[in-house]
Amino acid sequence: QVQLVESGGGLVQAGGSLRLSCAASGSFFSIDDMGWFRQAPGKQREMVGFISGGSTEYADSVKGRFTISRDNAKNTMYLQMNSLKPEDTAVYYCNIRIHTYFGSVQTYWGQGTQVTVSS
């Protein structure tokens, strides 16, 4: 079983910054891709970005403002969010794909953390 613990959400004014963390623990062979998603009220969950190996990809709406990084030694992924806008307000979820010791691939979601940007 794998557990994901997210932290770092909160309330910030427009133009401000926040850093989210997603720490993975449990029994697994390795972590493959890691990503961030968000869901605003009344909207579908959307991808914010992901990190695979040393490469990152971002949604157009956050390019140049958000940065995803990863500490493999800590099994932790980060989302640095700068120049926040009110439209960034959402619940942010981390998502990881892991390889088990039995050779299978599994996907897990974090519990979500609220980010609120005031205008």
Image: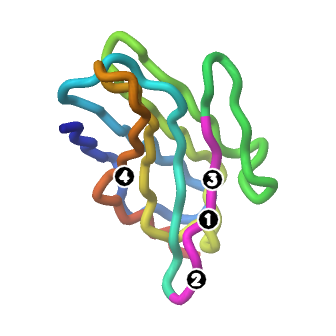
SS category of the residue bearing label 2: loop
Q: Quadrant location of residue 91? A: bottom left
Front one among 59 and 119: 59
Residue count near mark 4 (Cα–Cα under 10 Å), binned few <14, some 14–19, many ≥20: some
Q: What amino acid is at disc 1?
A: Glu
Q: Residue sitting at 34 percent across and 47 percent down?
A: 8
How far apart in space, not on screen, are marks 2 and 4 (Cα)?
18 Å
How far apart in space, not on screen, are marks 4 and 1 (Cα)?
14 Å
Q: Residue at label 1?
A: 46
How far apart in space, not on screen, are marks 1 and 3 (Cα)?
6 Å
Could you tell whether 31 is left or right of 118 in the image?
left
Q: Residue at label 4?
A: 109
Q: Residue sitting at 30 percent across and 22 percent down?
A: 102
Q: What amino acid is at disc 4?
A: Trp
Residue 113 drawn at (x, y percent) = 34, 59
How far apart in space, not on screen, are marks 2 and 3 (Cα)?
14 Å
Q: Residue at label 2?
A: 43
Q: What amino acid is at disc 3?
A: Val
Q: Residue at label 3?
A: 48
Residue count near mark 2 (Cα–Cα under 10 Å), binned few <14, some 14–19, many ≥20: few
Q: Which comes before the other along the chain, label 2 or label 3? A: 2
Q: Nearer the viewer, mark 4 or mark 3?
A: 4
Q: What's the magenta region?
A: 42-50
Contact (CB < 8 A) between labels 1 and 3?
yes
Front one among 43 and 82: 43
Q: What amino acid is at disc 2?
A: Lys
SS category of the residue bearing label 3: strand
Q: Residue sitting at 25 percent across and 43 percent down?
A: 5
How far apart in space, not on screen, are marks 4 and 3 (Cα)?
14 Å
